[in-house]
Image (cartoon, coloured by chain):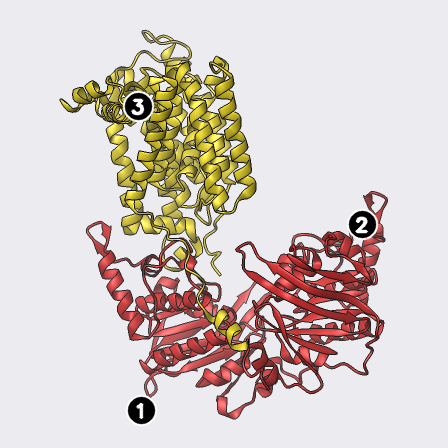
């Protein structure tokens, strides 16, 4: 057995993964992964999307079985056939997408599957007492009798943590826990994690947000293309160094060359206000103008009205007040199709849900959104030949790596799907491009290519609205920068002068009085 | 301004309207409703609106609906849509007819239950194991069941004494009980025709006189369902399969098992409903269910997927059903009642900001009121449609805050958890 507890005084690692390999048909998700997690520490696992982090954690949580390699918990080798085995060994998982039933109470969600009983009934009193006890022991502040539907995102995450603790976990896996949180909630979560650590629990923290990793982790393991490439200590690396370890090469730099901004206004938005179905004002009196050849970047913590802004501009969401003018024409009441026909291109934030039909071929996806214009239609009918020919053009010009245009969009990698969308939206010579997180979750090569396409289109007098969570991208790619906070544009910055730190504090509403 | 903006953003979302409505509110609503009915009774002279006979008939009509609805709660709480309740009910009626005339009503009930259970099992195999679309499987059962029932009816009943191609021999009814003393006292008060008091007495008398043991069993089953589904670990697990199967799976709940149990139980309840129907009407007849399985589903939706609610819904539909059977006068008075009810709905919807809905409800309400005053009776052809019209109006206009189980009707495959 290769996983004997090490001799000497040091305690056995809480988790020891040795030479883990996992193959799926056609891909090797993990190969020869080695990680050792010390007891009572926060251990971060970082890597790009598709680097194999999630597969590895599913293996550790018993959701999948490794083809090769061994797992040892506290020095003892284990084999997990199901999550139940992992739970029994004291390993708990807090999923990225919360595993909570909205219409059940916190108590019901927590005890589900291991309920205390009184006769055949559920012993609500005991359950309530235990939840309250755990909640106060770790400072989670969870009320057992509230409906989960009424809880905010941060509270739901604490319920997930409580669920795991209730089952007696000593090692917690947190899969991208901060992806859904606003900065204040991230701080609270990190406070909770420090409390848990102080109680001797071990935390495995998966993330690709490097600043957070550096601030909370005791050890960092970097994964790339399915294998572990480095183990570092946070004090020895910078975020940029970590990013290069993740990518395996120098990072492409987003930057614009000379200014191409003209004085011809393409999109003017004046006093735009949007009220959502609950009656909450999600966009409040937003005004801005984008000129031909200008990229306007919108910075903001997710959920501050960016999605609503984009949907209002595209005509997906009705606006309650204000006007939208495109090339001198009032389009406030125009339908989405009319807007697209008058030259709006749109790269949506979620390419799977809004950008593509995954189960349709590439050329059919090419037609989407341009189903009324050449070369896709002839009279009332689809022009299949024209659409296919133009799809071939996009595939060639935008370097979409695909076996052909008859394959389903689902068969492409995220980066290639995104390049197809960019190509589609750039065709028909739009005057305005709305790019919502255009490089989210794509590989570095595709990222550089997409930036280059935006730069080229800008030089040809395209106006671009760029929304992104990547501050370097925003600063590098924008001619003008605005910060959105709680539905309002609160500050303008000069991208040549601003630093990511200044932008970050403006996004949270702090330090705006300078 | 910054600080103000920040604090607004950080403040907790305003607490939602309290979900728990205290019991006395329900009591007040019931008293208010009875007062309105009583007023209409006095105004129109349609004594059948609150007579004990109507209430008895309503109870009898409501029980099969309630059983179908209860079946619906079990299956949908576990995330499986069971539109096949109607077909399962048909099998229940046949089972009761077959066993009932030979071995007595209780054997009929048990046999009907078993046939429904088998059909439920079939639905479970199709939807849970093979992932067939829930509606397709349910419709298949609805098409299959009457055919099977008719075939078997020809096979077994055609030559039986008193039976026929499309009907079974007479069945014996289940025993009935009366609360001694109280029933007579209420009967005396009922005949006085006092405003409200007599109406209350009529309702109470209807509820305590000649009540079938089957009805009592139904009440027990409704209460038991509420307890099992909401107060036991079993029920929590079952409901979790309908609310978030992936969460349930990630906590080691065997989702397939609970879905199987729930769907099978739902078939058993529907079969029981069918058996009640056959036994209480004295025989099995082809086409006897007449859409009651669907009305049961409607009652379940009206009741917001809860036992108490579905009992109310079934009671409401049973009441209109009974009215249609008993007197044309009462159906005419029902127009006015419905008009008033819709105006109330319109007011409530207006207050909660659903203006279009409120307008539609008010318009239809006024229309019914006008119909009442402009005519002396409802055409007999339409009387039979009354329960269905009420169903449609109630579901369309009153039920805007319903909350179905989140994953009901969604296909579920083991291991799809992220």
| Alpha carbons under labels 3 and 1: distance apart | 83 Å
Depth check, front residue: B401 or A472: B401
Q: Is residue B49 above or below residue A136?
A: above
Q: Is residue A494 above or below residue B115?
A: below
User: Callout 1: residue from which chain?
Assistant: A
The residue singled out by tag 2 in the image is A372
Q: Quadrant of the C terminus of chain A?
A: bottom right
The residue singled out by tag 1 in the image is A8
In this picture, residue B231 sits left or right of residue B75:
left
| Alpha carbons under labels 3 and 2: distance apart | 62 Å
Q: At numbered mark 1, what does the secondary structure look like: helix, strand or loop?
A: loop
User: Callout 3: residue from which chain?
Assistant: B
Badges 3 and 2, same chain: no
- Residue A307: image quadrant is bottom right
- Residue A348: image quadrant is bottom right
Q: For label 3, count other residues whose C-alpha is less than 10 Å away and answer few (under 14), some (14-19) or many (20+).
A: many
Residue at 29 percent across and 39 percent down: it is: B27
Tell me the colour chain B is drawn in: yellow
């Amino acid at each position: 057995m290769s996983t004997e507890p090490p001799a000497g005084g040091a305690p056995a690692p809480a988790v020891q993964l040795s030479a883990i390999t996992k193959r799926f048909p056609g891909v090797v998700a993990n190969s020869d992964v080695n990680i050792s997690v010390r007891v009572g520490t926060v251990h971060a696992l970082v890597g790009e999307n598709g680097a194999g982090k999630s597969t590895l954690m599913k293996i550790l949580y018993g959701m999948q079985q490794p083809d090769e390699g061994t797992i040892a918990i506290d020095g003892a080798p284990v084999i997990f056939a199901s999550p139940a085995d992992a739970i029994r060994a004291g390993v708990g998982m807090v999923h990225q997408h919360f595993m909570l039933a909205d219409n059940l109470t916190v108590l019901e969600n927590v005890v589900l599957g291991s309920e205390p009983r009184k006769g055949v009934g559920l012993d609500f009193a005991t359950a309530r007492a235990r939840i309250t006890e755990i909640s106060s022991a770790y400072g989670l502040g969870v009320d057992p009798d509230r409906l989960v539907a009424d809880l905010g995102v941060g509270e739901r995450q604490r319920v997930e943590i409580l669920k795991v603790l209730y089952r007696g976990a000593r090692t917690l896996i947190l899969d991208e826990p901060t992806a859904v949180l606003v900065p204040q909630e991230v701080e609270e979560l990190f406070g909770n994690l420090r409390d848990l650590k102080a109680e001797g629990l071990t935390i495995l923290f998966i993330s690709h947000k490097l600043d957070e990793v550096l601030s909370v982790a005791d050890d960092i393991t970097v994964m790339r293309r399915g294998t572990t490439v480095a183990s570092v200590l946070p004090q020895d690396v910078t975020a940029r160094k970590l990013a290069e370890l993740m990518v395996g090469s120098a990072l492409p730099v987003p930057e614009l060359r000379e200014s191409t901004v003209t004085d011809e206004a393409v999109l003017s938005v004046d006093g735009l206000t949007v009220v959502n179905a609950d009656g909450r004002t999600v966009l409040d009196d937003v005004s801005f103008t984008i000129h031909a050849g200008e990229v306007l970047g919108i910075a903001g913590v997710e959920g501050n009205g960016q999605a609503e802004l984009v949907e209002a501009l595209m005509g997906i969401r009705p606006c309650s007040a204000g006007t939208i003018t495109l090339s001198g024409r009032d389009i406030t009441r125009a339908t989405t199709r009319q807007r697209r026909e008058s030259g709006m291109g749109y790269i949506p934030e979620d390419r799977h849900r809004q950008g593509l039909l995954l189960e349709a071929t590439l050329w059919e996806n090419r037609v989407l959104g341009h189903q009324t214009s050449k070369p896709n239609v002839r009279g009332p009918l689809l022009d299949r030949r024209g659409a296919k020919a133009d799809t071939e053009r996009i595939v060639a010009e935008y370097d979409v790596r695909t076996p052909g245009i008859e394959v389903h969009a689902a068969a492409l990698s995220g980066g290639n799907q995104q390049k197809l969308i960019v190509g589609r939206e750039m065709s028909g010579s739009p005057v305005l491009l709305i790019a919502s997180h255009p490089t989210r979750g794509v590989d570095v090569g595709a990222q550089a290519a997409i930036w280059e396409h935006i730069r080229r289109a800008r030089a040809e007098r395209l106006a671009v609205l760029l929304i992104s969570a990547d501050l370097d991208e925003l600063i590098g790619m924008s001619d003008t920068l605005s910060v959105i906070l709680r539905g309002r544009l609160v500050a303008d910055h000069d991208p040549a002068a601003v630093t990511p730190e200044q932008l970050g504090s403006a996004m949270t509403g702090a330090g705006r009085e300078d | 301004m910054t600080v103000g903006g920040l604090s607004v953003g950080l403040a907790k979302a305003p607490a939602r309207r309290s979900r728990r409505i205290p019991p006395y509110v329900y009591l007040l609503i019931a008293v208010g409703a009875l007062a309105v009915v009583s007023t209409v009774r006095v105004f129109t002279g349609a004594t059948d609106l609150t007579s004990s006979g109507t209430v008895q008939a309503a109870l009898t009509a409501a029980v099969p609906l309630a059983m179908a609805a209860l079946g619906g709660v079990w299956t949908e709480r576990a995330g499986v849509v069971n539109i096949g309740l109607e077909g399962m009910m048909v099998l229940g009626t046949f089972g009761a007819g077959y066993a009932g005339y030979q071995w007595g009503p209780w054997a009929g009930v048990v046999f009907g239950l078993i046939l429904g259970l088998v059909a439920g099992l079939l639905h479970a195999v199709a939807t849970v194991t093979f992932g067939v679309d829930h509606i397709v499987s349910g419709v298949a059962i609805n098409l299959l069941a009457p055919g099977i029932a008719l075939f078997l009816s020809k096979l077994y009943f055609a030559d039986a004494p008193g039976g026929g191609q499309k009907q079974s021999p007479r069945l014996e009814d289940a025993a009935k009980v009366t609360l001694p003393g109280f029933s007579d006292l209420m009967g005396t008060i009922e005949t006085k025709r006092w405003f409200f008091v007599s109406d209350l007495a009529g309702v109470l008398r209807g509820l305590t006189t000649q009540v079938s043991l089957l009805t009592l069993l139904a009440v027990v089953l409704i209460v038991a369902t509420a307890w099992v589904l909401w107060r036991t670990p079993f029920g929590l697990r079952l409901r979790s399969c309908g609310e978030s199967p992936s969460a349930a799976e990630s906590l080691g709940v065997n989702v397939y098992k609970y879905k199987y149990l729930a769907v099978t139980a739902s078939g058993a309840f529907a079969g029981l409903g069918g058996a009640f129907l056959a036994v209480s009407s004295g025989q099995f007849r082809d086409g006897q269910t007449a859409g009651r399985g669907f009305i049961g589903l409607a009652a379940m939706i009206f009741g917001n997927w809860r036992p108490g609610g579905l009992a109310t819904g079934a009671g409401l539909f049973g009441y209109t059903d009974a009215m249609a059977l008993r007197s044309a006068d009462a159906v005419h008075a029902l127009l006015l009642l419905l008009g008033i009810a819709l105006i109330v709905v319109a007011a409530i919807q207006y207050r909660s900001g659903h203006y279009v809905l409120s307008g539609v409800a008010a318009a239809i309400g006024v229309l019914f009121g006008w119909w009442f005053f402009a005519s002396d009776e409802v055409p007999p052809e339409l009387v039979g449609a009354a329960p269905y019209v009420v169903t449609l109006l109630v579901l369309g206009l009153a039920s805007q805050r319903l909350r179905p189980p989140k994953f009901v009707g969604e296909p579920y495959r083991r291991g799809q958890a992220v």
